[in-house]
Amino acid sequence: MKFFNVLGGVLLIGAVGVGGAWYAWGRDLPSVSDLDVLEYSGQTRVYDRAGSLVGTLSPSLSSGGSVNRNLLKSSQISPWLQKTVVTSEDRRFYQHHGVDYIGIVRGLVKGVLQNDLEGGSSITQQVVKNTLLAELEGARTAERKFKEAILAFQLERNFNKDQILNAYLNVIYWGDGGNSDIIGAAGAAHAYFRKEPGELNLAESVYLTTLIPAPNSRYRSFQAYRPLMKDLLARMVEDGKVTQAEADAAWKTPIYPAGWRIGWNDDGSLRSAVLERPSRLGENLTLLEGVRRYPNQYYLQAVEKELLPIIGRKALYAGGASTPA
């Protein structure tokens, strides 16, 4: 009887705590409908009166203070990169409903042992943190964690797993590109390998994924973080994402991240690795932005600003329809 009284007291305290948190933080949550770019990621073409193409309007996803308008569909991103990211960042992504309680417990243990309270966030929570809650700038606060959890549940009710993973791959920060940040799979593939994101092989995908937790420091220490690639490949084999033969082949595949001069042995070990020109990341990113940027970008932003409150995000970004200028 005493046990049930204690259990009841704990549950009551928990309910009061959740209710208090909702009263304090839950009434001013942003709407997950603001992330309709997960569903409407087409591009609306804008023409002038003569019928000439001026440019395209596409939705954007923010990552802190940065914005990515080069949104990709999942079919444009290497399936290897999609698999490596799930295994590395959220192995139970397809099992949980927005919040991974097992991951939270693991994160709490990590926080106690390593003084790192950031562990345990699911991919869905990271999408929320980097878009709807970007203004909180990743502060490690109870308010942010509470809002993350509520919005993550809502996000999973409104969008499927593939849409959420695709949003993550479009919004994640992948390093310092000099004049602009490297945001999303398109930026990462071009900056590090001068490739389209759909062309990344398994070895390149594993490398890019191991950069995500700390891209700037890990990029500059190829030798030190090379073992993380082997660990990730081993976990992918455990999860059935790749075969052992595919993992072995990826380990032996030479990769050459921009700015590095690397010598490889046939068994996948390094002969040498020298960082010669880290500025190559920014140069490659500038080439990508130069290809994809229209000279009329400021005019397009003005068109977008005028049309958005009139016709709404869904009509503006659904794609396909032309808008006479």
Image (cartoon, rainbow, N blue to C red):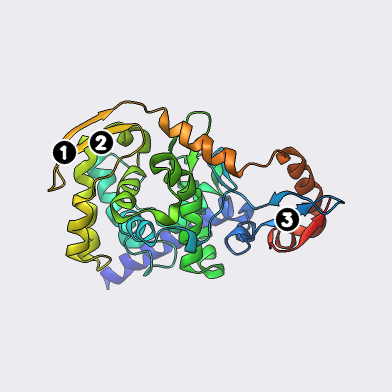
Q: Callout 3 environment at 10 Å: few (<14), some (14 to 19), or many (20+)?
A: some
On screen, residue 16 above or below 4: above
Residue linked to disc 2: 222
Amino acid at the residue labelled 1: Leu
Estimate the spatial distance between the alpha carbons at disc 3 and disc 2, rounded to whole Å: 42 Å
Q: Residue at x 38, y 43 (%)?
A: 193
Residue projecting furthest to the bottom: 1
Along the line of sight, the residue nearer the viewer: 252 or 153: 252
Compared across the picture, whether 13 is left or right of 46 comes to left
Among the two numbered marks 3 and 1 on one chain, the one whose residue lies closer to the N terminus: 3
User: Looking at the rendered structure, which numbered label has been put on residue 270?
Assistant: 1
Residue linked to disc 3: 45
On screen, residue 134 above or below 159: above
Q: Position of residue 255 (x, y in %)?
A: 28, 44
Determine the secondary structure under disc 1: strand
Estimate the spatial distance between the alpha carbons at disc 3 and disc 1, rounded to whole Å: 48 Å
Q: Quadrant of the N terminus?
A: bottom left
Q: Residue at x 39, y 67 (%)?
A: 96
Q: Residue at x 56, y 53 (%)?
A: 71
Determine the secondary structure under disc 3: strand
Along the line of sight, the residue nearer the viewer: 304 or 26: 304
Amino acid at the residue labelled 3: Arg
Among the two numbered marks 1 and 2 on one chain, the one whose residue lies closer to the N terminus: 2
Q: Callout 2 environment at 10 Å: few (<14), some (14 to 19), or many (20+)?
A: some
Compared across the picture, whether 25 is left or right of 208 comes to right
Q: Position of residue 143 (x, y in %)?
A: 50, 47
Residue 27, image quadrant? bottom right
Q: Position of residue 69 (x, y in %)?
A: 60, 48
Q: Are marks 1 and 2 in contact (CB under 8 Å)?
A: yes
Along the line of sight, the residue nearer the viewer: 56 or 40: 56
